[in-house]
Amino acid sequence: MKHVIKTQSVEETQKVAYAIGKWVKSGMILTLEGDLGAGKTTFTKGLAKGLDIKRNVNSPTFTIIKEYQGRLPLYHMDVYRLENGADEIGLDDYLYGEGVCVIEWASMIEDLLPNERLDIKIFRDGEFERRIELLPIGSEYETVSEELN
């Protein structure tokens, strides 16, 4: 069941992501979709804080994958520019590893994604206002809305 959250600021968006970061477990997959500037990386920064990651998180646009260490490893991916497929980056090692995967533009590799995951879409509703839609796919992900209430 889709869960919709509206935020009024960058801080509120990061607070939602922080709560999800406290909730995630080893091996979880989160996909992120949204227009340029919608807040995918901002969301990931909040998630990283929830994972107790101290390093600054920034967009992996040109590196494709950035790894961060915290309570769990965070694998932050931007697959928009992935030209030769997922094999070139060893995607399976990340998707089925011990860390948490956050995949921006995941629709580009839809056929490679696990059946169970948390799909997150971020929409701009104003300069700072965002609508965050969470769609849990699989029983392990359905408890996320409980965490946010």
Image (cartoon, rainbow, N blue to C red):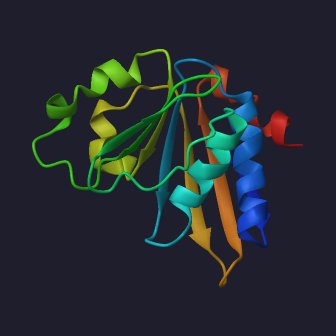
Extreme front residue here?
A: 55
In the image, taking residue 46 as reference, residue 121 lies left or right, namely: left
The image shows residue 67 at horizontal and vertical percentages of 42, 34
Q: Quadrant of residue 86?
A: top left
Q: Would you place residue 72 above or below residue 136 in this image?
A: above
* Quadrant location of the N terminus in the rendered image: top right
Extreme right residue here?
A: 149
Determine the residue positioned at 58% across, 69% down: 123
Q: Quadrant of residue 20?
A: top right
Determine the residue positioned at 57% across, 49% down: 44
Q: Would you place residue 45 above or below residue 35 in this image?
A: above
In the image, taking residue 138 as reference, residue 37 lies left or right, namely: left
Callout count = 0
Query: Which sits in the foreground, 56 or 88?
Result: 56
The image shows residue 85 at horizontal and vertical percentages of 15, 39
Extreme bottom residue here?
A: 127
In the image, taking residue 128 as reference, residue 94 lies left or right, namely: left
Determine the residue positioned at 29% across, 46% down: 64
Q: Quadrant of residue 125?
A: bottom right
The image shows residue 58 at horizontal and vertical percentages of 47, 55
